[in-house]
Image: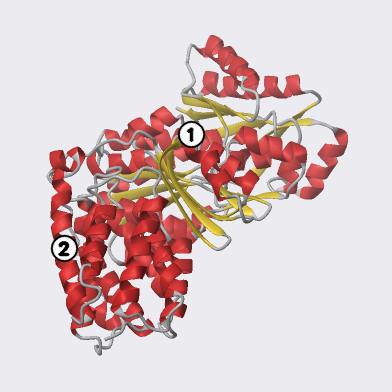
Amino acid sequence: MTITGKDLYGSLTFGFYNLRENMHTINTINVFPVADGDTGSNISHTLKSILSNTDGSGSVSDISNNFARTALIGARGNSGMIIAQFFHGFSLIANEFEELTLKTLVAATREAVAAAYRAVETPMEGTILTVMRSWADQLSRFEGSDIPISIQLRRALRAARKAEKETTNQMELLRRAGVVDAGAKAFVSILEGVDQYLLNPARVFSETNLLVHAASSTSEPAHAHENSRYRYCTEALLRIPQGRQQQVRDAVTDLGDSLVLGSYQDQMRVHLHTDEPALMFERLGLLSHIEEQKVDDMFMQQLAVTNRNSDTVIVTDSSADIPQQVVDELRIYRIPQIIQIGESSYFDRITISSPLLLNILDSNAQKVSSSMPSIGEIQRHFEFLAQHYKHIVVLSVSSKLSGTYNAYQLAAKALQDKGADISIIDTKLNASAQGLVAQEAARSVARGVKGEALSQSIRETAERTTIMVSVQSLKMMVGGGRIPKKLGSLLLKLNLKPVVGLSKEGGGAILGLRLSRTGSIAALVGRFMKVYRKQGIQAYGLSYIGDASLAISVAQIVEQKTGMKPLFVEQASPVIALHAGKGSISLSYIAK
C-alpha cells in the first residue's frame, strides 16, 4: 500500500471534520499557554484554510507543497502555527515523491515533527509537540516491515492517545486543572479522523456529508484559568527577503514569549504574546512587508470565559476614547478599525499608536488612509462573544462618518439568523463622545439593566451627548470628507481656527470660528459652561492628538469652574488622529 495525493487530502479532510466535532471540548480545556479557550478553533481554522485552498488533485508532491503554503497563510494561534510548521516539515521530504511508501512516510513525519519543534522558541513537553513526537516514533518503529501502512498508522494512533493522556502529569498547570493539553487532544482528534478515512478510503467525502457542528453548550470548564504574563496574542504574515529570518527573530524576541516562527519560501509567519504589539509591528515593518496581521486581547478573552460582569456585553470600535483601566473594569469589548499605510494594514490603537502615525504623516513618505474593519474580522469577534454572552450590544461610531455601522449589521446577520441576540446602535458620535456613551452603557449593564431598557437608555444618553473639537487646521478633515470641501477650502485660505462638532444626524459640522487657537479653546470652554449653567453636566471627558499638555490645562480650567473632574483625558485613536490632525483637542459631555 502507498499513500497518494488523494489519500493525503482525504485524510486531512476527515481529520478536520473530526476535529470540528470535538472543537468545543478542546476549547473548554484550553489552559496552556494561556486560558483563552480557542485552541480547537485556531487549529480548525488552520485546517479549513488548507482544505479551502486545495482541490485534492495531484501527486503527493503537489498536495504536500500546497498544504505547507496554505497552512502558513491561514495559521491562527500558537497551536495553528505549530501545525503549519508540521506541514512545512512534511513537505520538505514529501515534495520529492509522487506517492509515499512507509519508509518515505516515516521520513516525512520525522521531519514534520522536527520542524514543529524548531518553530517554537522554547519547546515544552506535555504539549502537542510531545504527542506529535510519540506518534512519529511509533510509526518509525517498524518502517522496514511489510505490515500495511493503515495498520502502522493505527498503532501510531494508540501511541498518540497514550501520550495525550500523559500530558496531564507532564505539566503542573495541566495537573492542577485536571485536564489534558488542548493542542494534544486536537492533534489526536485529527489522527482519529485520518483513521476513519483509512477504514474506508473509497467513501465519498463532502461538506454536505461530513459537516458536523460542535455541540452547543453554555457550560464552563470546571478548572481555574491561568492568566498570561502578556496581554496580546499577535500574529504577522510577512513577505521577507532571503536571509532575514534571523533578523526577524532577533527583532521580536525581547518583546514577549510564546514565540513561534514559521516560513515557506519567501513568506514567514510570526506568533508572539506581547504587551507591545505596536512596537512589534513597527520593527517587523522595517524588515519586511507585512501582508496580514492578527491580534487577540487574551485578557479580555479570559474575562469573557471566566469572569463576566453580566450576560450582556457592550461592544464598540476603537475610535471611542475610553481609558484602558475602564475598558478592563467594565468589560467593554473594542473592535479595532483599520489604518492603511502603503500596502500594509494596521489595527487602530493596537498595532499602531497615534504618536507613530503622526511621525509617518509628518514624513509624508507613504499614503495613509483609514477603513472600517472587514466583515470577516467583525464576525470573528462576534462569534467569540456569542459563545460567552447572551446579549451583545454594539455601539457604533456615527454611520455618517464611517461604514463601520453597516459592516456591523452585515457581520451580525448570519449569527442573528441562528438566534444570536446582537443589537447594533448608531451612536451618531465618535471619539471622546462615543467613549462617554460606551462607559455609561457598561455601567448600566453592571447595574443589571438589559434588553430594550438598556437600548433605550443608550439612545437617550447618546442624544444628550455632544462633542466639540478645537483643531489646528481643517486640512485633514476636508481631505477626509468630514467637512464640505468648498467651505473647508475657504476656511483654510482664511486661516481661521474653527470649533468643530457633529450634527444631530452624526455628520461633521462647524460650530464656530475664531481668529486664533486661544480663541478656539476659549470658545470650547465657553460653550461647555453655557450648558453647565443652563442644563447641568452629567459627565465629561477630553481627548487630544499629540501633546497632552493643552488638554490637561483645559481639563483643569473646567474643573476649577465646575468642581467636576473629567472621566478621562485620553490620547485619541490613530484613526481619529488621521482625520483631525496633530494638536486637536476634543471636549465632550453628557448633559443632564
Mark yes or no: residue 170 visible.
yes
Q: Does 30 appear above or below 69? A: above
x and y percentages locating residue 199 in the rendered image: 18, 82
Please say if 442 is above or below 389: above
Q: Which mark is residue 346?
A: none
Seen as rendered, the residue at the extreme top is 560
Q: Position of residue 164 (x, y in %)?
A: 17, 56
Provide the residue designation for mark 2: 159
Q: Residue 213 sits in which quadrant? A: bottom left
Secondary structure of the residue carrying numbered label 1: helix
Percent across and percent down for residue 288 are: 62, 51
- Measured from the top left, where is residue 460 in percent x and y? 42, 40
Dot 1 alpha-carbon crowd within 10 angstroms: few under 14, some 14 to 19, many 20 or more = few
Left or right: 576 as drawn, with respect to 422:
right
**Residue in the foreground of this view, choosing between 398 and 51:** 51
Q: Could you tell me which residue is drawn at 32 percent across and 35 percent down?
A: 444
- The residue identified by callout 1 is 254
At 76% across and 39% down in the image, what residue appears?
363
Tell me the kind of residue under disc 1.
Answer: Asp
Q: Which residue is more in the foreground, 450 or 211?
A: 211
Q: Quadrant of the N terminus?
A: bottom left
Residue type at the position of mark 2: Ala
